[in-house]
Image (cartoon, helix red, strand yellow):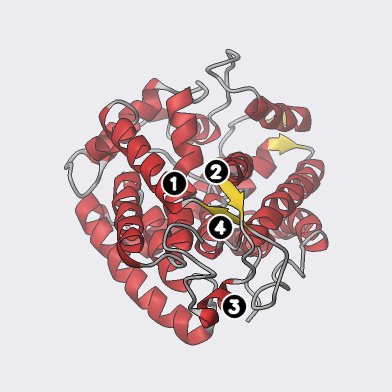
Amino acid sequence: MRSFTIQHYVLLGLLAWGLPGVFMSGVSALFITACTALPVWMLTNRSADSAIGLPRKKVRAVSLYTVLLLTLMYLLFDALLGRQKFDINMFLTLDATSSFIDNANDTVSQGRGVIDLFGAMMVVLPFALIDAARLARGAIRIAMWCTAIVYIFYDTGISRGYLLMAVLSIFLGNNLKAKNLLWSVGLALPVFFAASAARGDFDELAFSNPLFDGIIWPYINLRLFLESNCGNADWIDFITEFAKKFFPAFLVPKEVFSFNIEMTRCIYPSFMDTVNSISIFTWLGEMYYYGPNVLTSITSGFLLALLCRLVDARVSQMQLHSLRVFSGLLCIVLLRSRVQDVLSYLLLLFIFLIIWQVLAKYRDLYTRGYICRQGSSNLMRINNF
């Protein structure tokens, strides 16, 4: 079965979070969604996975021991001296959510530092490890799987969505058949609700359950935003915010516009300068804020399409199936908030893929299916794939 490309996931996210906006903002949401989704659909690479299951050109083979060692070193450094995300892990810390919001208030309008930026880029590392581990054997395979699982637990923080996507990505891989999808969702949903319970979400439900709350509240906030006098900005400001992404804050001092926090202050004026929670407005919020709406929508669609093609071509070449599923699902979740978040992620993913290729070396191996059928140690050693 042909897998979804990252463009397909982005297109699905645009439609899923855009079309229901009709009930909150009228027909304009339908028009904005069409203007944004059309460029993504037009530039979708429909043949990106034509090489799956067939012999292809020589692929880069990652040194498993090198990648494993570097991952362990980075994880240890980040846990002790870097982001220290065990301190805001919802399963380990009772006030993890409060700590996260306090940090967001303290860093509003600031660009990310080198540690946070590098950590955001490495969010896909455990899934690349899993893709590599699928081709390894023996102790190195077990070690890579264990490292990836620990990394995922560490990087979870307070994000239930991340955990949900991680479970789906691990069990789906490149197999998107209906039966496999159903039991993968069946495993992922209990994990999601367990994370919600650990975070205390069942104590603060507004509706029926955390999953429903997570879907409906962005639209409620969107309605509140449209009914409030929150101001607006020009299309060129949207482009400027995107351009700032190419100049890291640790190299070039810059001030970024924290859309969600600023709009939260607007619709909930009682928060004043410090917010108690951060509202999201679906990706439509940005489209309504930056005018003219049509120009912002079309621009967003072309930027998303170009970056998706750029990264998906590399993902397909290196056959990083779990990474692709995770990236696609993450884009869908990020579109629950902002287009700018998706653009940031795709740029970081592109840099990560370059690093992954730098860590690789050429081998005379072809497709995974061919290697597995041969089962010969002459073709594939434990050390490398």
- Badge 2 is on which residue? 359
- Badge 4 is on which residue? 332
- Whether pointer 4 and pointer 1 mark residues with C-beta atoms closer than 8 Å, the reply is no
Total number of numbered labels? 4
Q: Is residue 159 visible?
A: yes
Depth check: give the residue in front, 280 or 304.
Answer: 304
Q: CA distance from mark 4 to mark 1?
A: 28 Å
Question: Which residue is drawn at the image coordinates 47% and 79% (left, top)?
Answer: 181
Q: CA distance from mark 1 to mark 2?
A: 8 Å
Depth check: give the residue in front, 324 or 316.
Answer: 316
The numbered mark, 3 or 1, whose residue comes first in the sequence reads 1
Q: Secondary structure at mark 2?
A: loop
Q: Which quarter of the rendered picture does the N terminus lie within?
A: bottom right
Q: CA distance from mark 3 to mark 4?
A: 33 Å
**Comparing marks 4 and 1, which lies closer to the viewer?**
1
- Whether pointer 1 and pointer 2 mark residues with C-beta atoms closer than 8 Å, the reply is yes
The kind of residue on which mark 2 rests is: Leu
Question: Which residue is drawn at the image coordinates 42% and 52% (left, top)?
Answer: 126
The kind of residue on which mark 1 rests is: Val
**Comparing marks 3 and 4, which lies closer to the viewer?**
3
- Badge 3 is on which residue? 370
Q: Secondary structure at mark 4?
A: helix
- Whether pointer 4 and pointer 2 mark residues with C-beta atoms closer than 8 Å, the reply is no
The kind of residue on which mark 3 rests is: Tyr
The numbered mark, 1 or 2, whose residue comes first in the sequence reads 1
Task: Judge left or right: residue 249 versus residue 265.
Answer: right
Depth check: give the residue in front, 243 or 219.
Answer: 243
- Badge 1 is on which residue? 67
Q: Quadrant of residue 97?
A: top left
Q: CA distance from mark 4 to mark 2?
A: 29 Å
